[in-house]
Image (cartoon, rainbow, N blue to C red):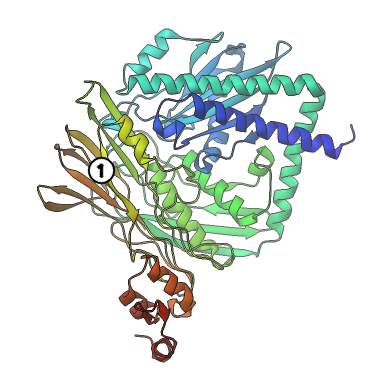
Amino acid sequence: MKTDPIKFEVIRNALGETTEEMSAALRRSAYSTNIKTRCDFSCAVFDRDANVLAQAFAQANHLGSMVRLVPLALEEYGVDNLAPGDAIVMNDPYRGGVHLNDIFLIAPFYYEEELRGFVANLAHHVDVGGGAPASVGAFQEVYQEGVIIPPVKLVAGGEMNPDVFRLILGQIRSKRETAGDFRAQVAANNTGIRRLTALYRRHGRQTVEEYARRLIDYADRLTRDEISRLPRGEFAAEGVVDNDGFTDRPVRLAAKVVIDDDGLLFDFSGCDEQRPAPVNSTLSMTYAVAAYVLRCAIGADVPLNAGYYRSVRLVAPEGTVVNCQPPAPVVGGWETHMRLVEVTFRALSQALPERVPAGTKGMICHSGFGGIDPATGEYFCFLETLGGGYGGRCRSDGPDAVQAHGQNTENAPVEETELNYPVRIERYELVEDSEGPGRHRGGLGMRRDYRFPSGEATFTILADRDRWGPHGLFGGQEGRRASYVVERDGETTPLGSKVTVTLRPGDVLSYRTCGGGGYGPPRERDPERVLKDVRDGKVDPARAREIYRVAVDTAAWRVDEEETRRLRDQEPA
């Protein structure tokens, strides 16, 4: 069959839009803020051999992990045990999964009574049981983190299996929201199956599947061609997670990237051994690091399917924090994943200085709380992740208060949060002077203050960056580190980055996230851009003078050019 380029693009985009429509169905059907508003989910379509054909661009963190989990889950459960209308559910981190909140639902796609492929989605559930509301905390075993689900059939013949559903919900605090979110996942997969059925009817089974194979080969060729253009060599860097949640000992991470005629190899052999603390990544989490960084390094519009993933090569020794073994806890594995992305980018900055940003917030930054709602008597759970500063780039500043890298979630709106939960968001603002100074400065961190006016709440911080701020590049300086505090009866008490506390009525818990690192020497920053930062309240005039060597006349709102020249002609301190 000769390739028709128009039909190739039609089928390519139809597969992609199938996953996007699955995402829309999931988002619009969900109950929890974390899914319906923050978009903490992902969707994908697979062929009958469990090769991924298309992925919705939702959470890049998830996508590499889905590629590993779905084939493993199907192999264990057995595709012969799946009929039309069935779906299996799974979240086991040691069967290809990630942390327990991320629950996968996989359904077979049948066409003309034959199995032709699969649709799948992953959604972060606000609670899966365990030792603290929202199922985040400084746990020491995976069994403390919540319900562990091996591949089991949740949907049979289009109907929920009531026994399995009751068993799962019996472990969970937020039963109403969780039940609604599971049904939304079922709706998303049903949407995908309908769209695939329409695609097969329009173009024919043989044509769709042949073009799908060619699409995989096309992505493989394009990826390898892009890799061939990269500079050859070995590039290494090290970094740390600030602490493990139980000890003050930093968690060492090491990345070596080898670019040779075989492509890119990501070698994480130098990372610390796993710990009985919430800082361990599963192999799927670490695989997602390599998949994401490779995508950024090649920079081309490569379809994210099985052809692309053929070029993802990874070394992650068993028993380390990047490939932990049971019963290691994994709830904070995405925190380690995020920092490993940062370390890997730092290594690649030697080879690709124009493509790599300075250090970003470098953490997921979980905020999870729950308790009994005084107004309803029901147990409530809430989870969100907070943004921070992005690193400065070769040609531009880092954005303020954003999610970084593969974390693509949105911020939870104040109005929706206050409407649905017994909490008040008293401050939500940028943190002045938190940027990493540079020719292109890092983005500012953000402050978010939670007050619980009428009842107690159990609150968990699962984050990082309170000991060291994001790194600068090529003369840029470090961003301000994060801080976490509780305010009670007029007194402010610092907290660690991985703690669970009980808040009394009236207490305020405050996050002040880190700024991004700077790119290039601060003295080379355009004085007019420094002036704008001062006028916008992002940089204090004294900081502008001391760090950027720019004198700002705040009475006339202009740069004092003569004084600025004098300051910049001085020898560096």
Quadrant of the image occupied by residue 163:
top left
| Image side of residue 89 versus residue 56, left or right | left
Q: Nearer the viewer, residue 180 or 361?
A: 180
Q: Nearer the viewer, residue 378 or 477?
A: 378
Coordinates of residue 494 in the picture (x, y in percent): 18, 53
Give the class, few, some or many, for how many residues have Cα within 10 Å of label 1's Cα (few <14, many ≥20).
some
Residue at x 58% of width, y 40% of height: 57
Coordinates of residue 568 in the picture (x, y in percent): 42, 87
Q: Amino acid at mark 1?
A: Tyr
Residue at x 76% of width, y 32% of height: 11
The C terminus lies in quadrant: bottom left
Residue at x 65% of width, y 55% of height: 298
Quadrant of the image occupied by residue 507:
top left
Looking at the image, can residue 71 be seen? no
Q: Which residue is mark 1?
A: 450
Q: Furthest-left residue in view?
A: 489
| Image side of residue 384 versus residue 399, left or right | left
SS assignment at label 1: strand
Q: Is residue 269 above or below residue 18?
A: below
Quadrant of the image occupied by residue 109:
top right
Coordinates of residue 390 in the picture (x, y in percent): 45, 58
